[in-house]
Amino acid sequence: MTTTTNTKEYVFDATGASLGRLATEIAMVLRGKNEPTFQPNVAPDVRVVVNNASQVDLNQSQLDAEYTRYSGYPGGLKHESRGHVIERKGYREVFEKAVYGMLPNNKLRAVMMKNLIINE
């Protein structure tokens, strides 16, 4: 008995593209909303590859936008600009944060994020 998987692979080129617009397309494909067999309780068998992530179009105000996280302790609110995140961790982290925020907040989000491959 052999089993075959029908993993579809989508390739996006980030050269000159807007971060938000590209992230919405990626989130829709990861969710499976572009397929006629969409089911909200099933993660589709797709793989999304983003090439040239470092050539995405970000202007100065977008680089100055801040990410916020909270440790849970008093005085534990941390702010970090997007430009600083790119210097520290690279464009991969920025794409992951953008797509992660556009996926539904349920158990399937981690499964869908594993299907995202970002190449700088």
Image: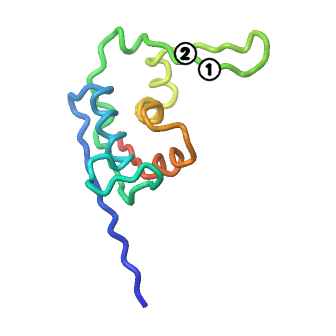
Q: Earlier in the sequence, mark 2 or mark 1?
A: 1
Outermost right residue: 74
SS for tag 1?
strand
Foreground pick, 59 / 36: 36
Q: Quadrant of residue 28?
A: top left
Q: Quadrant of residue 60?
A: top left
Q: Amino acid at mark 2?
A: Glu
- For label 1, count other residues whose C-alpha is less than 10 Å away and answer few (under 14), some (14-19) or many (20+): few
Q: Horizontal and vertical percent for residue 100?
A: 47, 35
What's the mark number on residue 5? none
Foreground pick, 74 / 58: 74
Q: Where 39 sits versus 68, above or below?
A: below
Cβ atoms at labels 2 and 1 below 8 Å apart: yes
Residue at 52% in and 26% down: 88
Q: Quadrant of the N terminus?
A: bottom left
Number of labelled discs?
2
Q: Horizontal and vertical percent for residue 93?
A: 47, 33
Residue at 23% in and 40% down: 13
Cα–Cα span, label 2 and label 1:
9 Å
What's the mark number on residue 80? 2
Q: Quadrant of residue 36?
A: bottom left
- For label 2, count other residues whose C-alpha is less than 10 Å away and answer few (under 14), some (14-19) or many (20+): few
Residue at 49% in and 23% down: 85
Foreground pick, 60 / 48: 48
Q: Where 113 sits versus 45, above or below?
A: above
**Mark 1, residue position:** 69
Q: Horizontal and vertical percent for residue 16?
A: 20, 28
* Residue 69 falls left or right of residue 41: right
Q: Amino acid at mark 1?
A: Arg
Q: Horizontal and vertical percent for residue 92?
A: 43, 36
* Residue 99 falls left or right of residue 68: left
Q: Quadrant of the C terminus?
A: top left
